[in-house]
Image (tube, coloured by chain):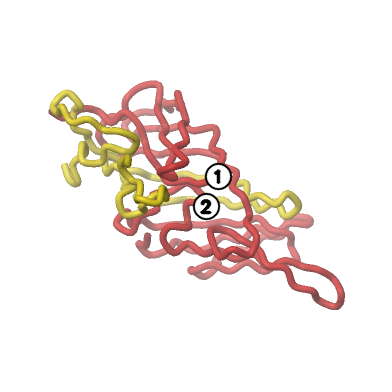
Chain colours: A yellow, B red
Amino acid sequence: MVRGEKDNGHADKKSCRLPKCVAPDHYTLLFVPNMTDPVLEGHMEVRVDVRNAISLLLTNRKFDAGIPQDLFLDEL
Amino acid sequence: MLCDTPSIVLNAINIKISNVTYTPDDSSKALSSKNVLVDEKLESVHIDFEEDLRKGRGLLKLDFVAEILGPVLKGLYRTAVVVNGVKKFNYFTHFEPVCARRCFPCWDEPEFKATFDLSIVSPKEMTTLANMVRFQDLILEDLRISSMCYSIVIS
C-alpha cells in the first residue's frame, strides 16, 4: 500500500495533503461555462505566498507514490 | 537546510491546465511552467517551473478547462428541468470538501483559507448567484458578465 491509499485502493483524502510551501492568499476567478459541450472554461489568478522547502538532502526517508508533505515546514 | 521551492502543487480532478506563469512581486519576469504533471491517484497537479521559486509573494496565472458534471452533486454540475415542454438546465456548485477540485484547480483543504473574487460569463437570459453579492452586471450582446464582491476569508 502506498502513501495516500486505503486498503480498498481508493485515495484516502485525509492523507493526500498538499505541501505547505506555497499557500494561496487571494483567488481571482473567471468562469465561462460552455453550455453545449458542456465544459467550464476558466482563467485563474492567485496571489500566493511562497515559503522555503526543506532540502531533500537532509533526509534518507524513502517515499513511494505520494506527496512528501512532511518535507515542508508549516510556518517559516 | 532550506531551499527554494521547486514546484507548486494544487488539487485538481479531470481539469486541463494551460498557460501557467508565476510572477514574483519583486520581479517583472514571469516564469513559465516547465511541466504540468497530473497525479490522478492523489487528485493533484504538480507544476514545475523553469527555475525554482524564491521565498516571497507572487502571482500565479493559469487557464483551465473543467468538466460540467451531470447531477452528481460534485464540483460544477447541472440538472435538467422541463419548462413548458422545453428542456432547460440549472447549474449548481457543490464545493464541500473535497469537490472544489473538480471545478477549478485550487488548494482544496480547509486549512488553506483565502479570499475570492469571481466573475461569471453566461447567456444574458440566465441569472447568476454566488456567496457574495454582485457588484456589477454587464450585458454585452448575448452575454451577461456578472462580477461578485470580494469574499471573506474562506476555504
**Place of residue B13 in the rendered image (x, y in percent of width and height, measured from the top left):** 50, 46
**Place of residue B125 in the rendered image (x, y in percent of width and height, measured from the top left):** 75, 66
**Place of residue B44 in the rendered image (x, y in percent of width and height, measured from the top left):** 43, 42
State the count of labels. 2
CA gap, disc 2 and disc 1: 7 Å
Q: Is residue B77 above or below residue B12?
A: below
Q: Is residue B28 above or below residue B76?
A: above
Q: Quadrant of residue B126?
A: bottom right
Residue corresponding to mark 2: B102
Residue at the right extreme, as displayed? B85
Q: Residue at x 19, y 46 (%)?
A: A74
**Place of residue B8 in the rendered image (x, y in percent of width and height, measured from the top left):** 37, 36
Chain that bears disc 2: B
Q: Is residue B131 above or below residue B28?
A: below
| Quadrant in which the N terminus of chain B is drawn | top left
Q: Residue at x 73, y 57 (%)?
A: B143
